[in-house]
Image: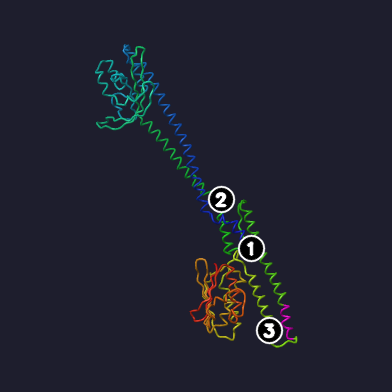
Amino acid sequence: MSYPQAGLTGALSPIIKSGTSSFRVRQLISMLVLVALGTSLLGGGYLSLFFENHNSKIQKAQAGMANELILHVPVFSDDIISTKNDVDELTKILKRYRFSEGQADNGTKNELFAYFQDPKTGNVKWQSKFPLEAYNKLNPEGLNDFVEPFGLENFDPKNTNFHKVTVDVMIDGIEKPHTYIVYSNVYSLESEEKVRLVLAQSAINSISEIQHVQYNIIALFFSTLALVLVAQLISNYFIITPIKEFETEVKEIEAGAQDAILKAYPVELTEVKSAINTLINVEKGQKQRYRESLDNLAHSLKTPLAAVLSAQSKYDMKENDQEDLKKSINHMCDIVAYQLKRAAVRTPNAIIRQQVLKPVLYRLRDSLYKVYHDKSFEIRINVDDLDKVRVEKDDLIELFGNLMNNACRFCQDVVEVTASSETNFLVIDIDDDGMGFGGDSPAELLKRGMRDDSKTEGQGIGLAISAEIVEAVGGKIELKASPQVGARVRLYLPH
């Protein structure tokens, strides 16, 4: 007969197998993935827009500078600076845009300069660091010495070009790499006279600003991670903790430490709690009904058998026939008792509450001293106060009652009960210093059923019932020789 516990274990196996640790890990990983994806998409999108706006701003500013320079710098053959007003106007432009003067800003973040160049010869016609040199005829050819080699051969003369170019700049007598944002464009007249304008601005500020944005995105990422971890802790407390407590209660029920789920849980777990408690109550009711039915069966059968046994002597029967009938009736009584005990034992799937072993053994010891009052022997109990087994109390009394009774019956001076704990079992040895088990195969005494030729006097049915009880709770029983040269019954009972 199977009990509803099988359905209970199947229903809860996903929760029990997964465990709260798995929930925490999965939740944390999912949150981190969402944060990584969200930050990457938002950060990448923001960085892309920033680059676009940043570059657009620089290009617009450089294009405005270029337009003013081409209007106010006389670089074509028909352009001249004829008045002081022309010089003042050009000077205003240079100061407004903060063009570098001389070599004071070489290689610094403030460096900004421009020059006009003959695209055919490569000679510089004018440059902003020495803006009046060409007009005063002061070594105009020397202007070539104060411009940087930006690789202008790679610029497309048909289009306006913006590039980041890194060149070696002489700073304090040492060449150091320096990055510029370079604008280049070729202008021409109807006379087909052409001039190239090169506008170079230090990229230090631009790079620093971009790095600042990148650092902010990284800081945002780790700040979000920190917030996620805090949210995870809060989530664990409010969501995962009830699941953990629920799982703990289920394990306590399976271990026999409690009879039902007792704590209050969130509404999502309330129905599961109710279903489990209902299954437990149904199982208890079935067990009680089984016991009552079997008790009724026992009384129904024992009374007629007893009547037949008492009446058989009244019949005119031969003495041998009367003895055979008596044996058969006694045999039938033993079978009824045996089947009653075997059917009453719980199945391995049942929920069994843990029982403390020591009080049961002391109670049995006191009873056995009274039963065998005419015999001088000692019952030693070496069991810890906290040793527990998952066997129902009635079955526990029946089990040790049978085994200790056999030991007391056949012992000479000592019966000893010793318990030791293993991983999943409590190992209990019941030793006596009697004659031991008869025959070469004492394990035959554990076989189910009862046959006169397969048991020694007084041991067969008790050992068979004991084996049924142990097997039903998922344990094991072994018959061995005792160190005291008697019989040893070793039990493996689940904690």
Q: Which residue is mark 2?
A: 239
Most extreme residue toward the bottom is 319
Q: Which of the labelled discs sits on residue 440, or is there none?
A: none
Rounded to the nearest whole Å, what is the CA distance between mark 2 and mark 3? 72 Å
Q: Nearer the viewer, residue 2 or 124?
A: 2
Q: Which color scheme does this rendered protein use?
A: rainbow
**Residue 306: in magenta span:** yes
Quadrant in the picture for residue 350: bottom right
Q: Residue at point 28% right, 15% down?
A: 135
- Residue at label 3? 324
Residue 78 vs 378, above or below: the answer is above
Q: Which mark is residue 3?
A: 1
- What SS does tag 2 mark? helix
Of marks 3 and 1, the one in the foreground: 3
Task: Tell me which segment is drawn in magenta.
Answer: 303-313
Query: Percent from the top left, x then y, of residue 113?
Result: 33, 24
Q: Nearer the viewer, mark 1 or mark 2?
A: 1
Label 1 or label 2, whichever comes before in sequence order = 1
Residue 408 in view in this figure: yes
What amino acid is at disc 3?
Asp
Q: Residues within 10 Å of mark 3 (few under 14, many from 20)?
A: few
Q: Position of residue 408 (x, y in %)?
A: 57, 81
Closer to the N terminus: mark 3 or mark 1?
1
Q: Which numbered disc flags the more N-terminal residue, 2 or 3?
A: 2
Q: Amino acid at mark 2?
A: Ile
Q: Looking at the rendering, which quadrant does residue 257 occupy?
A: bottom right
